[in-house]
Amino acid sequence: MFAVLARRLERLGSRRRLQLGLAGVLALIAVLAFLFIRTEAVDIAAQNQVALNLRELEKLDAEWDASIVRAHIGRAADNRRLTAPLARMHELTARLQAALPMTHSPAAAEAFQRLTVALAAKEQLAAEFGRRTPPLRTALLYLPPAVANLKTDLAGIGGALAPARIVLRLDASLNDLLSQILRYNLAPTDKLAARIADTLGDIEAQEIAFSPAVVDTIDTIARQSRVVLVNRPLANALEASIAATRTAEAMDQLGREYDRAFDAVLLERERYRGWLFAYSALLLVLLAWAGTRLRRSYRIIGEVNQRLKAANETLEQRVAERTAELQAQSKQLELLAQHDSLTGLVNVRQLTRLLDHALVRASRRGTIVVVMFIDLDGFKAVNDTYGHGTGDVVLQEVARRVQARLRAEDALARLGGDEFVILLEEVNSPEGALRVAQAALDAIRSVTRANGHPVRISASIGIASVRGRDGVERGAQALLAQADQAMYQAKQAGKGVFVISPQAEWAA
Ligand SMILES: Nc1nc2c(ncn2[C@@H]2O[C@H](COP(=O)(O)OP(=O)(O)OP(=O)(O)O)[C@@H](O)[C@H]2O)c(=O)[nH]1
């Protein structure tokens, strides 16, 4: 799969490939981040807080119920306890509501809704209950001692004016009333209410026989009894309604829904963890593949580099060889341009250059430059008799021998054919120049064999010289021409001699 992908990618342009690569990496990172966030999305602390809030709410609700029961049996001094937990309960329900989005559960939302409705109803009923119970409590606290006091009073001053029969009857009625009221308070029934009403009617009918103080007390007892008659069933009905709100059950239900939802969230987290694990493994495989490709690319680049380096080295070597060859050739050409190929002596071009320089130097120093034009005698005969090869050997031998007689700073050139020129600088006297000419003649005459053949040659030498600045003024060619003319005269004089040009200049 990767290989197919890689091949397709290779077909794209490098810019497009880079864009696609970047987009791919971003997508991979986005998926990784998504999976990671999903595994981290569960806040365990928040879940625990929900459980704690619910437990506290349940506790407060139970305390609330206990307060209602306390109020029922008349033990509560006031009804403040009925409203005391409400503020905290509201706070807790608000927290539970805030935790709802964490669950992603409609069932939990529904359970919470039921609980809030139940709590609101309970709060309303408890408020009504709270309004009803204080008069009831007052009446119930009032009646037993009031009846006992009245009875005592009847037995004394209160009953003194009334007939004993009526006093006894009132006493019995008061006893009945108290027991009926207490029973009614515990279990109110319509039948008992009717009997209490009868008893009250009976008591009130006997009032006439008693003093106003007693009548007052009887009226208060009757009034309080009626308070019990009216409020007890109402209070009981309110309690029943409060019990019917079933807030505890609603809380239980909500707790269960929260647990279920959180379990589901945890399960989902586990599932995403699995995905994350698998995805990480895939990324690792991808990385390994990319690494292999990268290594291969590096290897290929390395090989290409090696080859390039080798090619470069070969090229450099070839260039160096070629340069050396060219330098050698150019040196050779330079030599050829300056030297005579047969004898190795400087040629006419180089001689002219040397002569020019010598004339400049002489002009500067005021010295003398001497040029000797040498033309072999009898050379043609050698060629004609023994061939050109032997003639060449003679020419080489003449060059070698004349050169051997000259100083290192003197120059010997071959102009071509059997013509040579000797260039002398800084000649002090004509004698010195003549000695050189004589030595050259001797050297040439000494060539008596060539190629195993006997040869007989000599030379005619024309000598020209110039002093100081004159040479530069006349020029090299003029000096050579003078020497040539002198040589011609030597030929005419019978060959084998040297002749000094009449224009030759010597030291003053
Ligand atoms: N072997 C050989 N012969 C050459 C070369 N260049 C010229 N020659 C020959 O050299 C000869 C020169 O002629 P000349 O100077 O008349 O011969 P010569 O016998 O010395 O005559 P004179 O100078 O009058 O004394 C000719 O026969 C040319 O062909 C060369 O490089 N090698």
Image (tube, rainbow, N blue to C red):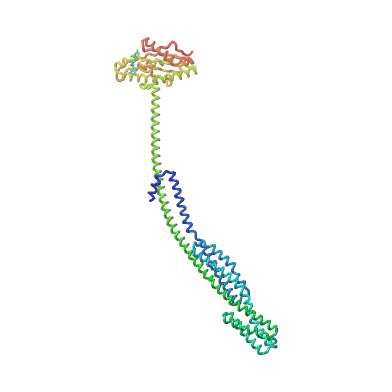
Image quadrant assignment for residue 155: bottom right
**Numbered label tally:** 0
Q: Residue at x 31, y 15 (%)?
A: 381
| Nearest to the observer: residue 5 or residue 260 | 260
Relative placement, left or right, of 179 versus 408 is right
Where does ligand 1 appear, by image quarter?
A: top left
Query: Compared to 149, does 13 lie above or below?
Result: above
In the depicted structure, whether residue 475 falls above or below residue 57 = above
Residue 185, located in which quarter of the rendered image?
bottom right
In this view, the residue farthest toward the top is 493
**Does 83 sit above or below residue 402?**
below
Nearer the observer, 223 or 155: 223
Residue 101 location in percent, x, y? Answer: 52, 61
Where, by quadrant of the figure, is residue 278 drawn? Answer: bottom left
In terms of depth relative to the viewer, which is nearer, 68 or 416?
68
Q: Is residue 325 above or below residue 233?
A: above
Where is residue 371? Give x, y as percent: 42, 16
Instruction: List x then y, in percent, for residue 504.
Output: 44, 12
Farthest-out residue, bottom: 164
Image-based side of 318 in relation to 260, left or right: left
Q: Position of residue 480 (x, y in %)?
A: 42, 15
